[in-house]
Amino acid sequence: MESMLNKLKNTVTKVTADVTSAVMGNPVTREFDVGKHIASGGNGLAWKIFNGTKKSTKQEVAVFVFDKKLIDKYQKFEKDQIIHSLKRGVQQLTRLRHPRLLTVQHPLEESRDCLAFCTEPVFASLANVLGCWDSLPSPLPSDIKEHKLHDIETKYGLLQVSEGLSFLHSSVKMIHANLTPENIILNKTGAWKIMGFDFCNPALNQSDQEPKFVCKEWDPNLPPLCLPNPEYVAPEYILSVSCDPASDMYSLGMVIHAVFNKGKPIFEVNKQDIYKSFSRQLDQLSRLNPNVLANIPEDVREHVKLLLNVTPAVRPDADQMTKIPFFDDVGAVTLQYFDSLFQRDNLQKSQFFKGLPKVLPKLPKRVVVQRILPALTAEFVNPDMVPFVLPNVLLIAEECTKEEYIKLILPELGPVFRQQEPIQASNMILLIFLQKMDLLLTKTPPDEIKNSVLPMVYRALEAPSIQIQELCLNIIPSFANLIDYPSMKNSLIPRIKTACLQTSSLAVRVNSLVCLGKILEYLDKWYVLDEILPFLQQIPSKESAVLMGILGIYKCTFTHKKLGVTKEQLAGKVLPHLIPLSIDNNLNLNQFNSFMSVIKEMLCKLEAEHKTKLEQLHVMQEQQKSLDITGQLNLSAGQANKASNQTDTLSTNVGQDFLTGVTDKQENGHAQKQPVKASLTLEEKQKLAKEQEQVQKMKSQQPLIPNSVPPMPPVKQTKDLTLTLMENMSSLNSFSSGNPKVAPGGFSSVANVPGSLGFQTPVDNMSANRNLQNGFNANPGFHTTGFGMGPGNPNQNFFSGTGSVGMSKTTPISTPASVQNFNALSSPPGMLHNKPAPDLSPLDQLFGSQKAKVSMNQMSQQKQTPWINQFATPQAPQIMSGPVTQTGMMGQTGFGAQSNPFFNPQSFTPPTNTMKSSSSASNDLKDLFG
């Protein structure tokens, strides 16, 4: 079985290849490209139908091919008869032109292997559709195998055939003589067309009102292709060798029966005994069984009985058949009107197109797409009719698949998208397209949307008609999700903003704001913040509807999860804009409450966000401070150890210098200048002082010794001031007897380094329990080498100048262990050296009585001038007044915050405080010296 199938398949493939090769030798191929085999038709389905296109215009056609190999079995004269019959039919069809007849695009061409001609595009023959698949390609085309005729297609198809017969009988005065399903062709749009005029019989006297036709006698010896199909031929044609237009009507009745009975005729004719078969058929027709017509619709059943009547005169003619109620179906009438549309004027067309949307849903999709859609799109060439045709086309597009839309409808809509004339029609077209915009954006490819659809939307936004602008703004949100983001951002939104700002219509302005508010969700956050919100401040009008539209956009942006408004935008732009609008006089109470509700929400959000930010910053700062303190403590501990070592070393060196009385530089015979160091800022000095205090505290702490009792601190005894004064006096007298060398001018010789200060170390030969005081601090001590405090001037006032941090060795000062304490000098601070010496003669009078009480021994040993005269010398530095304080280690001076380390108490008698009168001063001195 399998081998038989393979053999059959190979045979069919070979035949198909042979037919194709035969076609290639036909002159038709010079102008047409032949495609695949799609159907078959004609008498005995001898004609094979191929797809084809015209080379010059790319117009689609159908190529009918008769392969001469099919008649190789016949004798030559039989072949000639067959070829003659086929040629006659095609030539007659070519001469006839009618919408119900198959249109020939290219006449018959003959070659050695085949006959061929071209017609309008064809789907299949009615016989193929009804299940007769002879001469069809293998495998069978699915569109033919699955094709089912709808009632409307059947009704209108039979009506078309009736109209075709009416044309032949009334106008051409011709009998077809072989009307069968094989000779009825369904074209690409589904229309039924008549072909197969091989046995047509024209009237002898066409000019007469009653034409006469000559009928040939049936010759059973002729090949079947030379004879009509006996199953559809009227009985009188065989039995009485007569024919008239009624014979074709009998054939029409048989075709109607076959259509409703899957292609089966009423009678099967024995071609070997044709006369006997027709005699039997005639008897059956006289007593026609009602079951024979059971499948035929009741509306046409009685008319079919009349068509099958044995008496030709009883049969209705073609014109009568076109008017039977069976063909009064709405769909059939609609299709019939489309076929005669070219005969109608614009007014009739417009009225018909207005009512068409009510009919289209009742028609099958295939009928609408194949029959109605091409007729509608053909009207696009008439600009005045486009507004009436376009709604129907878009209604059909809704029922089409995307592929059908792209293939059948979109190419026809291209010119309509760009139509701008006449203006009234153009505005109507815009309105129609805008109402169906979701359909266009759903089924139109992205490139076509960008190139054709969106430009039309932009044109609508810029249209002068307010109605069009309102409609466009109202429907844009419904298809905003279908618009690509770049087009929306760069083209659509700017046009909406322009329409809002430039229009004089309040409705357009409000609709613009509403449209923007509805499409915010399709925009990104920063575009809204940078483009939409600033635009709201440019809107000129302050009507309540406009203000509420502005508020709506702010609220949508503020509350939308995807968008949102930053607190900086809220504080800097949104709230400063909203708050003035909220008190506009055009707002009513409810509108004002809406404004305040949104403003309060924004303020709450602003407060919460900024408070959270500040709290986070505060926590971070506290954490940073704790980290800085920890690192500073670790650093201070290390610096404390280092400073302690440096202090010990420095103290040792200073003590040695003091004992030896010379510095290292003096021993080497060089008085080198100390290196100059950069001065510190006040904050750095304060920080350094704090670190020193921390080091001192750490050093003063006693080490922790396990299981040991810390010693009790000595009890501080009350200080006896009288004893202290007497001891100071005796110490002064004892030290003055040593005749120390004093530098000229009354000061000890020190290194002339500006900014140096005295450093004290305890050296005391007296009793340990004595609390000696010198002229500089309350602690027992002596002046050692000074520490450099930075660069200075040699003529600097050392008592008022501020020293810089740093230490340098200076010449030790020979001073007694203690000197008499005094409070302040009368010289004002900051006195310069070149000022003239003050007149101190009153002081001589004042102290005259007290000089006698000073030890003469002390005065004889001093080779200096009295201390009062020393202040008169130009070289003597001015002494700053102020209380005497303890000299600090790092930058603290002996006279308060200012100090002169070169001051030598041996060179003068210390003065007392500045006196207001001589009598009070004398009393004070008496109390002081006894």
Image (cartoon, grey):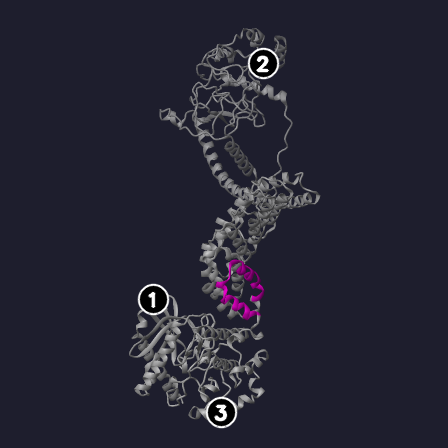
In this view of the protein, which residue sits in the foreground, 308 or 671?
Answer: 308
SS label for mark 3: helix
Is residue 608 visible from the viewing direction of this image?
A: no
In this view of the protein, which residue sits in the foreground, 723 or 432?
Answer: 432
Per the image, the residue denoted by label 1 is 55
Residue 666: x and y in percent read 38, 24
Magenta stretch: includes residue 347: yes
* Relative height, residue 341 to residue 229 (above, below): above
* Relative height, residue 367 to residue 926 (above, below): below
Cβ–Cβ below 8 Å for labels 2 and 3?
A: no
Amino acid at dot 2? Thr
Where are the magenta residues, as a range? 330-359
Per the image, the residue denoted by label 2 is 914
Magenta stretch: includes residue 484: no
Indicate which disc residue 250 carries.
Answer: none
Question: Seen from this angle, which residue lies furthest front?
Answer: 208
Q: Main secondary structure of the magenta part?
A: helix
Amino acid at dot 3? Ser
Q: CA distance from mark 2 to mark 3?
A: 171 Å
Q: Residue at x 31, y 86 (%)?
A: 77
Quadrant of the image containing the C terminus: top right
Residue 187: x and y in percent read 44, 72
Q: Residue at x 57, y 75 (%)?
A: 326
- Which numbered disc, 1 or 3, marks the residue that appears first in the sequence? 1
SS label for mark 1: loop
SS label for mark 2: loop
Residue 381: x and y in percent read 46, 58
